[in-house]
Amino acid sequence: MPQQAIRVTLLSLLNTTLFAPAIAILALLLAAGAHAQGPLLSEFQASNTNTLYDADGDSSDWIELHNPAGAPLDLSGWYLTDSASNLDRWQIPTPTLLPAGGFLIVFASGKDRVTPGAEYHTNFKLKADGEFLGLTRPDGATVEHAYAPTYPQQFADVSYGLSFDPGPTSNETYFTAPTPGTANGPGGPVMVNPGYAPTDPGPGEDVRIWVSVPSDLKGGAVSLTWRLDFNGESILPLLDDGQGADLAAGDGIYSATIPAQAFVPGQMLRWRMEAIEGSTLRSSSLPPFVDPKGSAEYFGTAVRNDAVSSALPRWQYWLQNPAKGETRAGTRASVYTNGEFYDNVFVRIRGGSSAWYPKKSYKFDFNKDQRLLFPSGIRHDEANINTTWADKAFVRQTLSYELYTLAGCVSSGSYPLRLEQNGAFRSVAIFVEEPGEESFLEEHGLDPEGALYKMYNVLNSWKGGVEKKTRLQEGHKDLKQLVQGLAKASASELEILLFDAVDLDQCFNYLAVTSLIHDNDHIAKNYYLYRDSDGDKEWQFIPWDKDLTWGRNYTIAGGVLNDTLWAMKDPFSHPLFGDQAHPKNDGPHNILIDRIYANPRTREMYLCRLRTLMDRFLETPAVQPHFLETWIDDLVVAMQADVTLDQALWGIPNWGSSYAFIEDVDRLKNKYLRKRRQHLYTTHGPAGSGVIPPANPSPPITVRFIQGDPASGKMGEEYVILSNSSPLAADISGYSLGGAIRFAVPQGTVMAAGDDLYLSPNVKLFRKRATSPTGGEGLHVTGPYLQKIEAGEWVRLFDRRGALVSELQY
C-alpha cells in the first residue's frame, strides 16, 4: 500500500500523544509498504445525517472496507479502531469474507453488533472534528491501513477516503456525493452550507448566492451556473474577495449575484456550483447530481408573482415537456412548495378512473437526497395531487381525511391547493398524504417496523389482491393468520381474536367516520391494514381514496361519475353497512367489518362510538350552526377565487347535470347532510329502529381494582381495571388517569355495558401473563401507561373535562 495513503511517519508518531508500544509503531510502518493488495478503509463518513440509514432507521456514521485484490479476503478477527493506543478496539466477527473487489459497510454507531450476516456496528463512534481511524490485522498490533495521526475536519453528508481512478489511489479526498458500498469517484474540494437571498425574489430583486469552501483549492476556482426555466445556462464566478456580493474577503465563503433584470413572475430560477482544485484539477459539484433519475441537478426557487393572491397553499411545478407529465410513463419536473425547492423529481398521472378525466391526478416521487418536507420535520417519499373532476363541490376528499384525523383515526393529511404549471394556473387540486410508506407511519406515531398492506380484496385472501409495503422480509404469514382466523373462528374464538388481535378502538373510529361520510367504496379496496408487529400485534384500518363520499357513490347505471346522492338508502346507508346483511351495491361485504358487527359486544361498542361522533360532528337538527356546514363554508371562502379560475379553464364537469361550485356545495349540505342526520338520528336512532343507542354522556365508570407488584416481578404485568356499571356502552375517549399512573385514554375507547377495561403498562406482556387475567380471554386491554404503582398510592380517573370521576388506593 502506498505510503501516502497511510499518512503515518515516524515524525508524526513522535509528535503525537500516542502511547502505543514501540513494537506496534514498527509494525505499522512495515505495513505501509508491505500490503499493497491488502484491505483498505476506502471511505468513511463521520457526520452522516441523510446519506445512509442503519436497520434502526438511524443515520449512524459508517466505515467502508474494500478488498482491491483479485481473490476473496477473510476479514474474520481483524479490528477497527479509532485509537492508536487501542488497536484492537472492535473485532470484525467470524466469519466475514470480503469478495474480490468487494466492499463492506460497518456502522460506527457505538451499538456494538457482531451477528454474522446482519449489520455490523462498532463499539465506537467517529468524531467529525478528526481523530485516528485504523484497520488492524488479527494480531491486534499490525495496522494495515490508517488515517493518522488524525483525519481532517468532516462535514455533514460529505464522506472522506481514497480517490479511485478507476481503482483506489493513494490520494485522500472528500466526496460530496458519498458512495457507500460501491467504488469511489475521484473526489474533489468540499462545498458546504449553500444559501441564497431573498428566498422568494421578485422581478426587480437580485439574488445573492453563496457557498462555503473549507478545503484548500490549491489555486483553483469556484463557479456558479444558473438558468431560468429551461432556457440556456449562464456562468458567473463565485468569489471570496469581499467585493460586490461577497461580504468578507478570505472567510471561505464564495459569493455571486444573479441579476434581476432577466426575471419574469412565476419563472423557475435554478443554479449549481462547481469547485476545481488548481493543482490536481479534481472538481466537485453542488448539488452532486450523482443519479440523473434520483437526485437534484440544481438548487432553485420561484420568482415571486405579486399578482397571485390566494388563500390556498401553492404547489408550483415546471416540466420541459408538459405532455409527458400527462402520462403514466411520466417525466422529470421541479417543484416549489412551502418555501422549499425540489429539483428533478418524477411526476406521472395516478388513479384508476381518474386517469381518463380531462383534469387529472398526479403522483410526485421525490429524490432520496431531498424528500418532501412536512411541517413535522419528517420527510416523505411521495405526494398525491388529486383531481377534483369527480367532485363538483371540491371539498369531499379534504373533509373525509381530516374528519378521520379529528376522530382519532390514523389518516392521511389532506388540503386543497392551488396547482401551477410552468408559471401558469393549472387547477384547484387536493393534496393527499401517501400512506404506503414508512414515513407515513412515523408521521402518525406508528412503528415503521410494523406490517403495512394495501388491500384490494374483502380480506378473504392473504395472497391475491394484497400489496405489502413494509416488513417485506417475512412474507404474508401475519396476514394469513388474520384471514384464516376470521374465516374459521367460532363465536367464542372470534371474540378472543377481535380483542387480542385487532385494535378495536381505532377500528371503531374508522368505521364510525366511514358511516358519517357514507363511503361505500371501502369494502373490497381503498383501504390499508397495519399491524403493530413488534408491539401489541394488533391490526387496524387506514383509510384511502375518499372521492366517493358524502353521498356520492358508484352506481350500476351511472358508474363513478353521476349526480346521485345517497344519504338514507338502505342497505347502503345503514349504520351497519359493510357486513353480510348490508353489502355493497355490486355484492361484496368486508370480512373484518362483518365479524366486528356480528359479535354483540363489539357491535355495541362500535355503535356507541358512532353515536359519540354523530353528536360531535354531524349534530342533531336542533343544533345551530352545525359544525360540518360551518367547516364547509370556511373552505368555500378560502377556495372561491381559485375555483372560479379552475372552472374558467376546465369548465364545469360535463357529466350529469351542470352544477356549478356553489350549487353542488348547497346540494352537499341540503341533499346529503340534512338527510343523513334524519337517517341516523331518526330512522335508526332510539325512537326509530333502535340500532344507534342514545347518548351516554356521564357513565358510571369506576376504578375497580389495582394490581401492583405482580408475582413475576415484571412491571409490564401490572394492571388497573376500570368498570362500567351502566346498562349502556360508555365512550371514555379523552378521559385520563392520574396519581400513581399517567395515561390519556385513546380516542375510540368504548366500554361495553357492564364490561371492564384493563389498563396495562405493556399490552404485549399483559397478554403473556402466566395466570389470569391474560391473553386468550377476550379482555379489553389498552395502554401503555407510565410509572410503577407503589403501595399506598392512589389511581384517579378524570373525565374529558378534567373532573374527578373515581379513585382507588393501592
Image: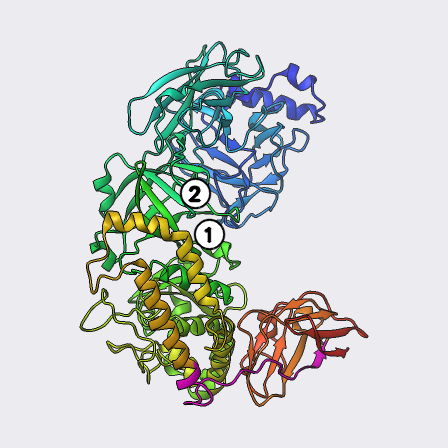
Q: How many marks?
A: 2
**Mark 1 in CB contact with mark 2 (< 8 angstroms):** yes
Judging by the rendered image, the residue that carries numbered circle 2 is: 371
Does 271 sit left or right of 622 as displayed? left
**What is the CA distance from the residue labelled 1 to the residue labelled 2?**
10 Å
Which structural element holds mark 1? helix
Expressed as whole percent of the image width and height from the top left, the position of residue 322 reads 24, 39
- Is residue 549 among what the camera can see? no
Vertical arrangement, residue 562 with respect to residue 710, above or below: above
Q: Residues within 10 Å of mark 2 (few under 14, many from 20)?
A: some
Quadrant occupied by the C terminus:
bottom right
Q: Residues within 10 Å of mark 1 (few under 14, many from 20)?
A: some
- Which range is magenta? 681-707
- Is residue 409 among what the camera can see? yes
Dividing the picture into quadrants, the one containing residue 307 is top left
Mark 1 or 2, nearer chain start: 2
Vertical arrangement, residue 692 with respect to residue 32, above or below: below
Whether residue 335 is in magenta: the answer is: no
> What's the amino acid at mark 1?
Ser
> What's the amino acid at mark 2?
Arg
Dividing the picture into quadrants, the one containing residue 282 is top left
- Residue at left offset 65%, top offset 68%: 743
- Residue at left offset 45%, top offset 85%: 685
Which structural element holds mark 2? loop
- Residue at left offset 46%, top offset 64%: 630
**Depth check, front residue: 629 or 212:** 629
Expressed as whole percent of the image width and height from the top left, the position of residue 195 reads 50, 27
Judging by the rendered image, the residue that carries numbered circle 1 is: 439
Dividing the picture into quadrants, the one containing residue 494 is bottom left
Give the prevailing secondary structure in the magenta stretch.
Answer: loop
**Depth check, front residue: 598 or 560:** 560
Vertical arrangement, residue 9 with respect to residue 435, above or below: above
